[in-house]
Structure formats: structure tokens, C-alpha cells
């Protein structure tokens, strides 16, 4: 079909055949595995259902232990194909952030008895289309029992997910949990801190949630966060009272990094954190977003910057 543009004619290209897609993708995989046959980065490669099907049958994939499929066009059917692939059954790390996975796909992942990929230690599902409805099932799924790192940020994650994670009998090995840009408030945080995995947590990202002083106090008073090294609380609603509670938290003495910019505290709360004797192991304290290289700057926090609605 001709398209006239400025007197010239351009013609729509025919969609490549499955054989052509297979040949192209196999070349990309070969090149990607040249440095390390166990690690493959396929971010932003326009991978959708056909490509997932090709990968699921490609013998070149069998040695791969870490696969990054972020920023593609992977939906529920492609997710199912990948997780039911015998070629991929030895995967340990799978990153699926910034795709098109919905609750239906996540429910299949949680409930299916046909999955072959069941030994994942790292799973990223950030920035998809998931909600409490499916995440609550993921938290109970034996298919994810080996996870040590889970990323769920930038989904419709709320208190229902926090409660499910807190009650999970399966996710007992988590060391890193990312819940950035979610909708968890103080009540949800209290449920999350009951989790069996809490004593193992090394990194916890609660940036851009709905936490106030009460949430900060819950973290400060927790007695099961002794292994926590990195805590991200950027862009919440923590005021001076919460900042002071964090500054006095003996239970958080092991922290190496604390991020608390874009909250509601003033210079009083910032100074309490800067002068904290309880947080004596801190190597990085970020009181101002982007201040990693200028630690003397204090933002006293800019509440108008991005976070879920606190109403």
C-alpha cells in the first residue's frame, strides 16, 4: 500500500516471518552471550509473545542463569511461555520490569502447576500492571519459594500486598524488597514488618509511599531489622517527629545507607539525623534528593515532588 509523502511513495514493510524473527533473535542472543554464557541482557529489544516463544525453545538459552527482559512488550501469554520453558528452568535471576503483565499473568505464575522456572532467587516485576489482587497470591505461591530479591515497585501495590507479604509462609528468604512508588501507609507497614523474612532483610525500598511519622516510628521500634543495611524512605510524609524517631533508632544501627529526602521534616529533624549517635554506621545519609555528592545540603524536604496522593 503506497503512502504519498512529498511526492514520493513509501511502502509499508511486511511483518517479518517467524523464521526471520528466529534468525535475528538467535544472532542477538549469540552476541549477548559472548562475554558470559550465564548472563543475558535483552532490555529494550521489542520482545513480545513470538520472541518469548523463540527464546523458550532456543538451546542457546540453557546455560543462562540471569536474564534481563526489562522494557519490552511482554504480556501474560509471553510470561506463561517463559515460565513453562524447560530450556529456562535453571534461571536464577529474571527481570521483567517495564512490561505489560497484568493480574491474570501474575495469578497464573502464582497458581500454575506447569511452571518449569521455579528456582528464581531474583524476580523483578516493577512497573507492570499488577495490583493487590495478584500480589497477594504471589506471596503465597510455592513457585516463588526460593526468592531472595523481589521488586514490585510502580504497580498498584497497597496495604493488601503489604499484609500478604507480612503473612507469607513461603517468602522466608527475602533479603531485598522493592516497593517504590506504591500505596502503603502506616497500617500497611506494620503488617509488612511482621514478615518472616524481616530479620533477613538487607535492603528495603519504601520510597514514594504514604508513610508518616507513625510509619517512621514503626521502623524505629522494630526489633527484627538487625540485618538491614539500606533503607529508602524518599518522598513520603515523614515530619520532624518521625525523623527524630529514626535518628534514635538503636534497632537500625546496622544501616549503611539511609535515604529520606522529599519528606516533611524541617531543619530540626534533619539535624537530628545528621547528629544521630544511634545510626553510627551510616556511610550515606541523603536528606536532599540528588545530594549524594554534596552531603552538606539539606532539603528539609520538598513534599510537592512525586509521591502517591496522601489524602
Image: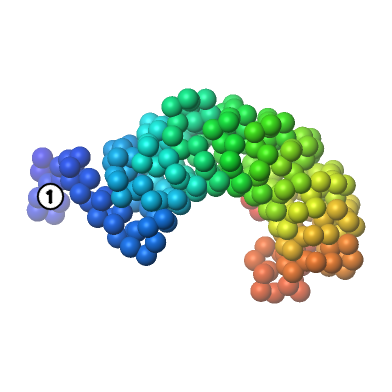
Q: From this viewpoint, is residue 85 visible?
A: yes
Q: Is residue 250 left or right of residue 171?
A: right
Colour theme: rainbow
Q: Dot 1 lies on which element?
A: strand
Image location of residue 59, percent across then percent down: 30, 46
Res 262 seen here: no
Q: Is residue 302 above or below residue 160?
A: below
Q: Residue at x 47, y 25 (%)?
A: 113
Give the residue number, with chain letter if any, for mark 1: 10
Tell me the residue at 13%/54% (across/down).
6
Q: Quadrant of the N terminus?
A: top left
Q: Residues within 10 Å of mark 1 (few under 14, many from 20)?
A: few
- Report the front residue among 128 and 30: 30
Q: Quadrant of residue 37?
A: bottom left
Residue 63 position (above or below residue 141): below
- For image coordinates 9% across by 53% down, the residue present is 8
Instruction: Look at the image and tell me in which quarter the C terminus lies.
Output: top right
Please tell me which residue is depicted at 80% across the width and 53% down the height of the picture.
Answer: 226
Above/below status of 211 relative to 282: above
Percent position of residue 208, x then y: 67, 48
Residue 154, percent from left and from top: 57, 43
| Image mark count | 1
Left or right, 15 with respect to 38, comes to left
Give the image quarter of residue 16: top left
Residue 268 percent across, percent down from the top left: 88, 62
Amino acid at each position: 500500500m503506497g503512502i504519498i509523502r512529498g511526492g514520493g511513495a513509501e511502502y509499508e514493510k511486511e511483518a517479518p516471518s517467524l523464521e526471520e524473527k528466529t534468525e535475528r533473535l538467535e544472532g542477538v542472543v549469540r552476541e549477548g552471550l559472548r562475554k558470559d554464557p550465564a548472563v543475558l541482557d535483552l532490555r529494550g529489544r521489542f520482545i513480545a509473545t513470538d520472541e518469548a516463544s523463540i527464546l523458550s525453545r532456543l538451546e542457546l538459552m540453557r546455560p543462562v542463569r540471569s536474564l534481563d527482559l526489562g522494557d519490552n512488550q511482554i504480556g501474560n501469554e509471553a510470561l506463561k511461555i517463559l515460565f513453562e520453558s524447560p530450556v529456562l528452568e535453571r534461571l536464577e535471576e529474571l527481570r521483567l520490569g517495564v512490561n505489560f503483565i497484568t493480574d491474570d499473568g501474575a495469578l497464573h505464575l502464582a497458581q500454575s502447576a506447569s511452571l518449569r522456572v521455579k528456582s528464581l532467587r531474583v524476580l523483578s516485576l516493577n512497573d507492570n500492571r499488577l495490583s493487590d489482587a495478584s500480589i497477594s497470591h504471589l506471596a503465597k505461591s510455592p513457585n516463588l519459594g526460593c526468592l531472595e530479591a523481589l521488586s514490585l515497585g510502580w504497580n498498584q501495590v497497597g496495604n493488601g500486598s503489604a499484609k500478604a507479604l507480612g503473612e507469607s509462609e513461603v517468602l522466608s528468604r527475602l533479603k531485598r524488597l522493592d516497593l517504590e512508588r506504591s500505596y502503603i501507609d502506616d497500617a500497611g507497614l506494620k503488617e509488612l514488618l511482621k514478615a518472616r523474612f524481616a530479620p533477613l532483610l538487607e535492603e528495603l525500598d519504601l520510597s514514594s509511599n504514604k508513610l508518616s511519622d507513625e510509619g517512621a516510628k514503626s521502623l524505629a521500634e522494630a526489633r527484627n531489622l538487625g540485618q538491614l543495611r539500606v533503607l529508602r524512605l524518599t518522598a513520603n510524609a515523614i515530619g520532624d517527629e518521625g525523623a527524630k524517631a529514626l535518628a534514635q533508632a538503636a534497632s537500625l544501627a546496622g544501616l549503611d545507607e539511609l535515604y529520606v529526602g522529599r519528606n516533611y521534616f524541617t531543619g530540626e529533624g534533619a539535624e537530628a539525623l545528621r547528629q544521630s549517635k544511634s545510626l553510627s554506621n551510616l556511610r550515606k545519609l541523603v536528606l536532599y534528593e540528588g545530594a549524594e555528592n554534596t552531603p552538606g545540603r539539606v532539603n528539609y524536604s520538598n513534599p510537592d515532588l512525586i509521591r502517591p496522593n496522601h489524602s
